[in-house]
Amino acid sequence: MREWLGLLARLIVGGVWIVAGALKVTDPNTSIQAVKAYDLLPTSVVEPVGYLLPALELVVGLALVLGVMTRGAAAISALLFVAFIIGIASAWARGLEIDCGCFGGGGADPDAASKYPWEIARDVGLLALSGYLVWLRSSRLSLDAMLFRRTPDYDTEGA
Amino acid sequence: MATKKNKAAERAERAAALLREQKQRERRRNLITGGVVAAVLAGLVVVGILISRSGDVEAPTASDYGVAIGDPEADHQVVVYEDFLCPACGAFEEETNEEFEQLADDGQVYVEYRPFELLSSFGDYSARSVSAFGVVLEQSGPEVAKEFHDLLFEEQPEEGDEPYPDADWLVEKAVEAGAEEDAVRPGIEEGVTEFAEQATDEARDANVNSTPTVLLDGETFNGSVDELLDQVQE
């Protein structure tokens, strides 16, 4: 049962990452502007992060959906969500009104403040699912099960 | 009995040794597979970044759809893609317009403004204003067009706040900028012109899809306005 829940968690979190990454990967300028809008990173880091994030999101999403390196991908996914939660919370606390840039877009958004709680709640939920996948170790229909075989620990003492 | 027990123990030992060996082989194999899979995933991230990079802004050095100030041979070249309706462009103009005029006069920078229609989802002002800019540029020349550009930003309507200023208002601003009313009125009353479409196509082809997009010496500039002005004066 747990292993099926793991599959569901993989599909949800992975699906979200794939959509988020795919919407941004072809539009680096918007991605860079979105990162810049948070006003948290030094200028020299904004650009590499703007290029890296969409690609990383896409690959983490693919890995989760396929179930390759699931625990590693889930750990990166969890770290990213922690970073996004901090980013959004800090924008909110500083009174910035910006589009989170989660699914493309980014920059100023006059209605942003009303969206922050929901965005944080969503990311907390996805963070919880990512954490669950790290803890779970293995889930149904994953490539990991095919790639990495493990002989179970028989009790070799024969007792 | 004793020998039987011994034999059983030996068998168990052999089985355990085999299992250990198998597990060791498995560990080694899993490690190699893991390394290969990790490398493939890392490779995919790199491919993703390369795809992103191919979406970089590659602006043509000269455009028929803009207006420039300063000496083209100045130390620094700035290109600004903007939309007359975009609030961030309005803010950018407010912070840089006079500074750039001054720096261009001093020969430190050449600034080319390239308006195009980005915000079509917020009504027709974006397209009509670029069209009017084109009419003024064609009928009254770049200096009047630059002045018209400045006026449109100084008195920028709010994004989404319809009804937007009409053709009469645009004509009025063009005249204020120094255009002859008879020369620009027919063109501006046409509404959306081919100029706007072509300017927008050119911007799209250059991968510009947000405004303001600022290029400093050919590279997209992502820093703050202060950093931009500092770098131009270096």
Image: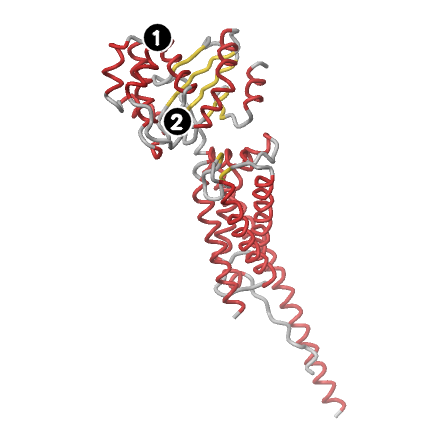
Viewer-nearest residue: B200 or A139:
B200
Query: How would you rate the neighbour count of disc 1 (Cα within 10 Å): few for under 14, some for 14-19, many for 20 or more?
Result: some
Image mark 1: chain: B
User: Which colour assignment does the render follow?
Assistant: secondary structure
**Image quadrant occupied by the C terminus of chain A:** bottom right
- At numbered mark 1, what does the secondary structure look like: helix, strand or loop? loop
Query: As displayed, is residue B141 above or below residue A57?
Result: above
Q: Which mark is residue B42?
A: none
Q: Position of residue B205 (x, y in %)?
A: 36, 28
Q: Would residue A151 be found to the left or right of residue A118 on screen?
A: right
N-terminal-most mark, 2 or 1 = 2
- Residue sitting at x 44%, y 28%: B87
Which residue carries the number 1 mark? B178
Q: Position of residue B141 (x, y in %)?
A: 33, 9
Image mark 2: chain: B
- Residue sitting at x 34%, y 35%: B121
Q: Position of residue B142 (x, y in %)?
A: 36, 10
In space, the residues marked 2 and 1 are separated at their CA atoms by 22 Å
Viewer-nearest residue: B135 or B61:
B135
Viewer-nearest residue: A152 or B115:
B115
Query: As displayed, is residue B67 above or below residue A89?
Result: above
Which residue carries the number 2 mark? B85
Using the rendered view, name the quadrant where residue B83 is placed: top left
Query: Seen from this angle, which residue lies furthest bottom?
Result: B1
Query: How would you rate the neighbour count of disc 2 (Cα within 10 Å): few for under 14, some for 14-19, many for 20 or more?
Result: many
Q: Would residue A82 be found to the left or right of residue A16 on screen?
A: right
What is the three-letter code of the residue carrying label 2? Leu
Same chain check for tags 2 and 1? yes
Q: Would residue B58 be found to the left or right of residue A147 on screen?
A: left
Task: Verify CB contact (< 8 Å) between mark 2 and mark 1.
Answer: no
- Residue sitting at x 39%, y 14%: B67
Q: Position of residue B42 (x, y in %)?
A: 54, 46
